[in-house]
Image (tube, grey):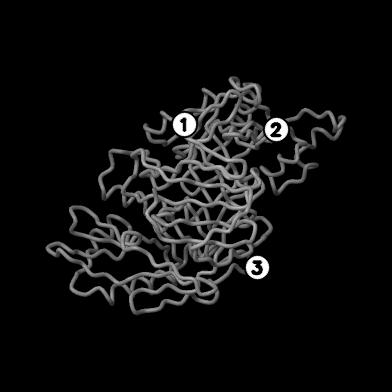
């Protein structure tokens, strides 16, 4: 850590995809690939393991106008956007993540990422020296507390106490962020975010110098102060996730940030619930909670146990929507009856435990020799009576040579991951759904459609 801080102290001295109107920004959203050499078994195993690691992070986080933005899918499990930062602008790819708040990019020519796929090394890094608007954030800047929410300005800036505080030039302390499958560390900048017909000066963004297992920068779209929607003053966030069938090819949908509110028609809506505030677990306040009441599998209703319906005083329980998770996570007490509902209703197909062990997915059924496979319908029933009917491709996936199908949801053991959200709705289940986060009225809306 000492060498890391020394490295940061040295570095701190260094230094046509988007369309918009005055009230909205639209950004292409795509899927991000980091390992094109994986076979399908490896890919599913990776995505299942990634989803569980992501659940560990989400459930136990470590504190540390309209714009249209293309949104691209990638085979490592997430979706990416490209944003231009700096003067002149430098285009940088980011993973779009509703489960976090901070926005950061790989930074400087000295940027290092350990255990990162070779393909991700081709991603551009931001070069502060080439931007006339890049500034290291000061210790007394209120945005420094966005990076370090557990610390008061006085404790962060103790070196300024013996000097004239108004002229203190000490930088905001470096950050280190732990994710479920990696980490990143660097220093905070204020920089200009360039959107068509609109420039956002003094945008807080992280200049990461060291990362582990992070294929690209991350754009946090959560409810926190440092998130991209909050810094833009967005009243709505909406996107439509293209199918994972289009992983790693140049097909995208749009992510839309609205600063002028206009209610859309033909959406099914359920309330966004109040996020819990728990001392020492600040990340929970940035999650998008919804009231999932029951899961319907065919003719069987699986009710969510009472203790999991909403977060308690310790922040445990409840359901969140997380674009950074691939396969939906269900706590053990919810997953087992859901799995058993499928096992009891799927007739004529044997389970294949070998594939279940290989992919970490269950149940898996051998459907070789069958041209038609009938599977139970799956529905999510939310507070207020709204219902999301999942297409079959959103909860079962073909494995191998079309002879095995597996449920694309994951769980923990009975004793693990008992803290934090009980259900994490991942992006695989949201394929070809238009979803809207109404930040003004605290509502979550959705409709099934072909995303393009």
Rendered view: 33 above or below 403: above
Foreground: disc 3 or disc 1: 1
Q: Which residue is mark 3?
A: 313
Q: Position of residue 305 (x, y in %)?
A: 50, 76
Rendered view: 202 above or below 40: above
Few, some or many C-alpha atoms within 10 Å of disc 2 (few <14, some 14-19, many ≥20)?
A: many
In three-dimensional space, the C-alpha distance between marks 2 and 3, rounded to whole angstroms, equals 34 Å
Task: Determine the residue located farthest toward the left in the rendered image.
Answer: 369
Foreground: disc 1 or disc 2: 1
Q: Which residue is mark 2?
A: 137
- Image marks 2 and 3: residues in contact by CB distance under 8 Å: no
Residue positioned 50% across, 69% down in the render:
292
Q: Position of residue 80 (x, y in %)?
A: 45, 41
In three-dimensional space, the C-alpha distance between marks 3 and 1, rounded to whole angstroms, equals 47 Å
Residue positioned 37% across, 72% down in the render:
338
Residue positioned 47% across, 63% down in the render:
416
Q: Quadrant of the N terminus?
A: top right
Of mark 2 and mark 3, the one earlier in the sequence is 2
- Circle 1: element type: loop
- The one nearer the camera, 364 or 10, is 364
- The one nearer the camera, 123 or 45, is 123
Is 187 left, or right, of 92 in this rendering? Answer: right
């Amino acid at each position: 850590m000492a060498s890391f801080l020394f490295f940061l102290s040295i570095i701190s001295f260094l230094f046509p995809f988007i369309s918009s109107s005055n009230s909205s920004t639209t950004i292409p959203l795509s899927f991000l690939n980091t390992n094109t050499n994986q076979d399908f078994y490896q890919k599913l195993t990776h995505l299942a393991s990634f989803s569980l690691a992501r659940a560990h992070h989400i459930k136990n986080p470590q504190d540390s106008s309209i714009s249209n933005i293309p949104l691209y899918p990638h085979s490592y499990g997430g979706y990416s956007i490209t944003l231009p930062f700096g003067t002149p602008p430098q285009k940088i790819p980011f993973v779009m993540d509703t489960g976090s708040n901070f926005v950061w990019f790989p930074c400087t020519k000295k940027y290092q990422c350990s255990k990162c796929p070779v393909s991700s090394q081709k991603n551009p890094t931001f070069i502060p020296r080439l931007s006339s608007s890049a500034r290291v954030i000061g210790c007394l800047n209120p945005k420094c507390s966005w990076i370090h929410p557990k610390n008061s300005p006085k404790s962060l800036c103790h070196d300024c106490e013996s000097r004239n505080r108004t002229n203190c030039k000490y930088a905001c302390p470096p950050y280190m962020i732990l994710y479920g499958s990696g980490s990143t560390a660097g220093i905070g900048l204020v920089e200009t975010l360039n959107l068509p017909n609109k420039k956002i000066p003094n945008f807080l963004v992280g200049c990461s110098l060291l990362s582990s297992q992070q294929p690209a920068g991350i754009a946090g779209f959560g409810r926190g102060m440092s998130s991209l929607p909050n810094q833009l003053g967005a009243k709505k966030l909406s996107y439509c996730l293209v199918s994972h069938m289009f992983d790693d090819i140049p097909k995208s949908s749009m992510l839309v940030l609205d600063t002028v509110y206009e209610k859309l028609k033909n959406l099914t809506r359920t309330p966004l619930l109040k996020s819990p505030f728990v001392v020492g677990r600040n990340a929970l306040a940035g999650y998008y909670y919804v009231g999932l009441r029951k899961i319907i599998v065919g003719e069987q209703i699986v009710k969510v146990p009472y203790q999991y319906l909403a977060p308690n005083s310790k922040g445990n329980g409840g359901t969140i929507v997380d674009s950074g998770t691939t396969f939906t996570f269900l706590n053990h007490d919810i997953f087992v009856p859901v799995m058993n509902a499928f096992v009891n209703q799927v007739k004529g197909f044997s389970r294949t435990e070998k594939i279940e062990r290989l992919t970490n997915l269950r149940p898996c059924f051998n459907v070789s020799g069958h041209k038609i496979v009938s599977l139970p319908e799956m529905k999510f029933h939310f507070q207020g009576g709204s219902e999301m009917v999942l297409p079959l491709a959103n909860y079962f996936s073909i494995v191998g040579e079309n002879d095995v199908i597996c449920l694309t949801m994951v769980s923990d053991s009975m004793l693990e991951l008992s803290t934090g959200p009980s259900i994490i709705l991942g992006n695989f289940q949201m394929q070809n759904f238009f979803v809207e986060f109404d930040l003004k009225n605290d509502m979550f809306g959705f409709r099934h459609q072909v995303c393009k």
